[in-house]
Amino acid sequence: MKLIPCPLNGLRNAEEFVCGGEVQPEPDASQLSAADWAQHVFHRDNRAGLVREWWLHVPSGYWFIAERDTLSDRFLRSYPASELFAKRTPVGPAEPGDR
Amino acid sequence: MNPSPQHRRSFLAHRQAVLTAPKAIAPDGLVLVDLSARPRLGFKGRGTPAWLQGRGLALPGRPNEATPQADGGLLLRLSEHEHLLLAPLSETDGQCQALATAQARERPDHVYPLPRQDSHAWLLLAGAAAADCLAKLCAVDLRADRFGLGDMAQTLMARVSVIVARADLAEHCGYHVLCDSAVAEYLWDCLLDAMAEFGGGPLDQAAFASGLRNPEPP
Amino acid sequence: MNRLPEPFGCLIDRSRPVRFRFDGLAYTGLAGDSIASALAANGVRVLSSSFKHRRPRGIYSAAGHEAGVLVQVNQEPSVAADERAIAEGMTVSRHHKGGRWIERFDRFLPVGFYYRAFFRPAFGWRLWEPIIRRRVGHGRVDPGFAGGEHDKLHLHADVAVVGGGPAGLAAALAAAETGAEVVLLHRRPRLGGGLLWGRPDAAGQHGGDLAAQLGAAVLAEPRIRILTAATVTGCFADRWLSAVQGARLIKLRARALVLASGQREQPAVFRNNDLPGVMLGSAAQRLIRLHGVKPGRRAVVATANDAGYGVALDLEEAGVELAGILDLRPGHPPGDLRQAAAHRGLPILQGRAPVAAEGRDAVQAVLHAGLDEAGGERGRLAADLLCLSVGGTPAAELAVQAGATLAYDPDVAGFRLTGLPEGVFAAGAVDRRFTAQAAEADGKAAGREAARAAGFVPQPMHRPTATAATPNHPFPIFPHPEGKDYVDFDHDVTVADVANALTDGFEHIELLKRYTTLAMGPSQGRLSALNAARLLARARNLPVAAVGAPNPRPPFGEECFGHLAGRGHHPVRRSALHPAHQARGAKFMPAGLWLRPAYYGSDAEVAVRAEVMAVHHDVGLIDVSTLGGFDIRGPDAPEFVERFHTGSFRKLAPGRCRYGLVCDVAGSLIDDGMVCRLAPEHFYVTATTGAADGIYRSMLWWQAQWRLDVDITNLTSALAGISVAGPKARDLLAPLTRDLDVSAAGLPFVGIREGHIADIPVRALRTGFVGEVAFELHVPAGMALALWEMLLTAGERLGVRPFGVEAQRILRLQKGHIIIGQDTDANTTPAEAGLALAVAMAKPYFVGRRALEIRAGQPLERRLVGFTLADPLAAPPSECHLVVRQGDIVGRVTSVAHSPVLNQTIGLAYVAPDQAEPGIAFTIKVRAGRLLNAVVTKPPFYDPAGARQA
C-alpha cells in the first residue's frame, strides 16, 4: 500500500485518505459561457506528469494539497491548502448592512 | 448546554453487565476499560491555544502531541487550533468542568467548545501485550519504543477513525483510544476479539482504578 | 523404508512417528516430514495426475514450485505436499485419479483446442461445461468446510529481510549491528536456506557449519525479529509486504528491504522429463539432507555446473548407485566438486545430455546423446532417478512486483535483476552470488546498504562482484519428435505447443503465455518461464534478451480466502438508543453504516400500521440520531450557510429554521435538511443519514478554499435525536420541562429553542416531516437513552409508541416530502423535484448557482409529481416501475406506499413536464408488462393546509 505524506499527520497508508481530484480554483462564474462552465465542471486535464490534487486525511478531517507525478505515481510534496488559498475569497458583493 | 451528570451513561453501559469479574491488572495481563463516562472536552478555533494557556494548561508544542497536566489529565493537540482534554484517571474531573464554565462565561473570541464526551467514546487498553494487540487492528507503529508517552495519532483502527495516545500508567503499558461514539460497541467488540489470544478481557473502571492505586506485586 | 541414518535428515525427529493416510492407505512418517517426503520414505512416488494429460507426477523441486505436488488435505484443496508438514491423523488424497487414456489423444488436443473446439455452436457449451468442469481444477471445494480462524497483523521494520539463507542471515545481522530493527521472514521452518541441503564444498561440511553459526548469531541478536514458515506473498508500493504465516496475514511496512530470496533450479526439457523419478538435483539433496530420505537406488545426474557434482557426491554418500553423470558442457571444465567426483571414480560422461527418459509410471532408464552437430551415438543408462542440475533462475517475483525487471543476460545465460526501486536491495543467489561465501558477503553488504537507506549510518562496504562462472546451460532443451517434452508441467505445455502458438501468431511472451497457459498455472512459471523464453527466442531468431520473461503477479505462494477475508472488519454505527430498540424487539435495517429500527415487533404489516396510527392519533417516538448535524459558528457563519445552501438564510431570525437544499457544482440535488439559526453567528444545520459524511467533507473542502472566519463542527454522533410526533406530543412534553414553552405560540412550526426536558439539555426543533405536531429533540448522545426511557414512561398514559423507518416513510409520503437519493438521482435539479422555492437565484453565489442558471435555460425534461391510482383497488406499482407514454419511457416511480390513514395507494413519480398538472392520467408499466393507470395528484395527500402541524 502506498504511503501518502500528510502535512498534519506525516506519512500514512493510502487507506486513510480520500482523493478530492485536481486542484481547480473556481472561476468567476459570471464571466463564463455555459460551455466554459461545463468545461470547468466536467472536464479534467488528466495530465501525464505533475498534478496538483486535493487529498483528505479522513481520521482528522484534514484537506490538503499534494503534488504527484502521475507517470511514476510518486508524491513529490504536500502542503496545507492555505498555501494556495491564503485569503478569504470574496464571492459576489455582500448584501449591504448585513455584517 | 450544561451537562447533567445524573443522566449520563456510557455508550457501552449495556455491555458492562457482562464484564468478567473485576480483577487487577497483572503485569503481563491485558485489559480493556470503558472510560466513556469520564469527563473530556475539546476546544477549537484560532483563539484556543492562547486561551488554554491563559487558563494555566500545559500546551503540547505541535499537533499530534499530548501533554500531561499537573492534575493527571492529558491535553491532546489534534491540529494547530484544536485541543482535547482528557480528565485524570482518578475520581476528579480535573479541569474539564472549570474550563467549560469559564468558556461559557467568558465567551473568548474564536474559541469554540466541542462536546467530546458525546461525540467520542473513550476506551483504554492496558497491559504488556497492548501494542501487539493493537497491531492486529491498526497500521500505525504503536510499539512503546516508537510511540512514546506524549505521542498521539489520528488514524484508522479496524477501519474506523480513532485518536490514539499513550496512557501514563507507571509500570503498565497503556493506550487511550477515542472513537466516534456511534462505533463504540463495534470497536469494543473488535478489541475484545483481538485481545482473546493474549488472554485479555474487559475490566470495569472502578476495579481498574483501584488496581492502579494498589498494583499487584509482580 | 528409504530412510537414511544420521546425519542425514536435519529436520526430522526420529523419535516421533506420525501416522497419516494417503489415498485410503495408512502410512507412517516422522515429525518434520512433509507429506511428500514421508511418502517418498514409504516408497510412494506418484503424488498426482497432471492437469491435461493425466500423467503421473511426483516430487520435482521438493520446494513447492510445481502443481504436480498439489493434493487434497482433509477438506483443504491445493495443498503443496512438499511443503505441508504431516500431522497425526491427516487424510491426504489425490485431486484426480485415472483418465490417463486422454494422453493417447494429445495430438488432437493441441494448445488452444479449448478455445477453438467449444465456442461453437453456442448451445454446445452447456453440454461441454459440466464435463470439462469435472475434469479440470486442482481439488474440490467443500462448501460446508467450516474453515478456521484467520486474522491480520501489522508489523514494522527499519529493515525487512526476505529469505533466511546465507545472504538473508548476513544481511539481517549487518543491518541490526547498525542499530536498525530488523524483521527476517523465512519461508521454511528452519533458518539456513540452501546451506541446510546444498553442498558448497567437496567435504560437504561447510554449509551446515555456516548455517549453525549464522543462525545462532541471528537468534542472539535482540534487534532481529524472526518469522519462520512465513511466506512473503507480495511486495507492493513503498516497501509494503504481505506475508502468510499459518492462519495469519501479515502486512509489513519497512523503511528498507533486502530481498534474499535465492534462486530456483530449472529443469531441462526432453521426452518424458516429467516422469516420477526425474527431479531437480536440489530436490534430491533436500530429500537426503532435510528429511533423510533416499531418493532412488540407481541415479543419473545431468549437469551443466559444478553443483551437479555435489548432487552426485551426496547421492553416493546416501548409498545411491551412480549410473552416470551427464555433463552438458564440452571439454574439461574446472571445479572442486567435479574433481572430487572424478577422484572417487564416479562415471562422468562429458558433453552428453539426457534426450529422453523411459518408463511408464516412473523413470526406468535415461537415453543420452552427444551435444555436437552429429549428436553422436545414443546411450542408455538404466536408472530409477534422474537429477537435473542445468541451471537456475533468480527467485525474483517479489523484486519484480516491487518494480524491478528481469533482463536476460547472455553472459550468465539467465535472467538478472535490474532497476530495483529506491530502498529495495537484492542479495545472494537472487543477484547472482551463487556460492555460500559470496552470498554471505553480499548479504552483509546489502544489509548495511539497507540500514543506510533506513536512516542508519553504517560503515560502507564493497559488495563482492557477481560470480563470473554461471551455473546455467544456455539451451537445455532437447525436443523430441514424439512429444511429451514438457516446458510447463502445470498445464502440460510441450515444445510443440509453443511452436503451434507461434504458428498461430502469438509471438509475444505475454501472448504466448495466455494462449498456451504456460506460466499461468499454480506455479506461475517458476519452472517454465526461462525455458519458454529460450524456445521463443530461438524460434523467432532473436536474442533471449529481446523476448524477456512473463510477468509474475502476486500472490507468490498460496493465500487462502481465509487470509483475505478473515477479520475483514466491517464497521457498524449504532445510535445511542440502540439498546432500547433491541429491548423493544426492533427489526433493524441498514442505512449507510447505521442500523436503524425498521419497525418494532415480529409482523411487519401489523407493526407498521400500528405505528402509523399511533402517530396519527396519539404520539410516537422515532430515533433520528442518524441525521447529520453541524454547528456553523463564527462571524462568517451566515456567509458560509449562504454559499453552501441554495436558499436564503441571512434574514432567518434566531430561533427559526428553514428547509435547506444543497446542490453540487453541476446543479444536481445532493442533500436537504434544516438550517436553524440559534444565534446571529451560530447556525445548526442537519443533513440526511446517508449524506452526512459527504456533506461534512464537502463543507470542509469548500471552507479550505473560501477561508471564511467560521468553525464547522460535526455533531452527528454527539447529538442523538428523538422526534416526538403526534397530536399528543405537547401533552407528553409539557409536564417534563420548566424552561421550554412547547405551546404553538411558544415554539411555533419551524422554530428552534434550547432548553431542558427532564433536566436533559435539548435543542428542540418544530419540524413537519411526518405531518403531525412534531418536536425533534437533539440531545447529547450520552443522555439520549435516559431521555428516551423517560419519554416512554411519561407517555404511557397517552399511548406513546416508538415507530421505525417504515412507518416514517409512509407518514412523510402522505405529506409529499421527498427523500434525496430515493426520489432524486444524480441529475435531479430542484426545479424537477418541485423545490424551486428553496433556491434563491437572486443570491450572487451559492454552490451550483451557475449550473442552475444554465440548466434553467434548457427545456425541463421531467417533473416529480404525486400520484394516486385510477382504480383504488388495483395492486400498487413498485419503486422504479417505469412511466411510459406511447411506448417511450418518460419517467419512473420513486416512492409508493399504501397509506393506512387515507386508505389508498399514494406515490411519487417522474413524468413528462406536460403531464405534471393535477388530474392528468398517466401509465405505469408494472410486472409482466401490464399497464396501470395513475393520476397526478398534488401533494400533500394528507392535511394539505397543514392544520395538524400548527
Image (cartoon, coloured by chain):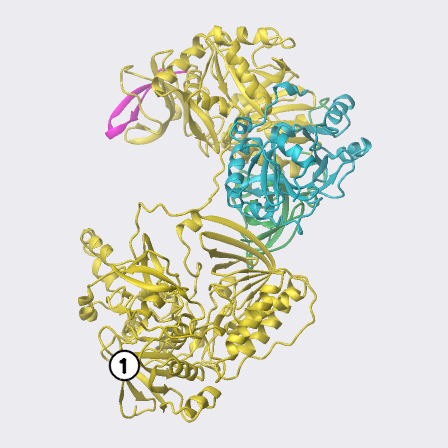
Residue C153 percent across, percent down from the top left: 52, 50
Residue C685 percent across, percent down from the top left: 59, 25
Near mark 1 (Cα within 10 A), the count class, few <14, some 14-19 or many ≥20, is many
Q: Is residue C78 above or below residue C106?
A: above
Q: Is residue C441 above or below residue C920?
A: below
Residue that mark 1 sits on: C356
Which is nearer the eye, C941 or C405? C405
Q: Is residue B187 above or below residue C927?
A: below
Which is nearer the eye, C500 or C723? C723
Whether residue C316 is visible to the viewer of this picture, yes or no, is: yes
Three-letter code for the amino acid on which mark 1 is drawn: Ala
- Residue at position x 33%, y 31% from top? C889
Q: Identify the hue of chain B.
A: cyan
Q: Identify the hue of chain A.
A: green
Q: Identify the hue of chain C.
A: yellow
Q: Which residues are magenta?
A: C919-938
Please identify the quarter of the rendering in which residue C270 is found.
bottom left
- Label count reads 1
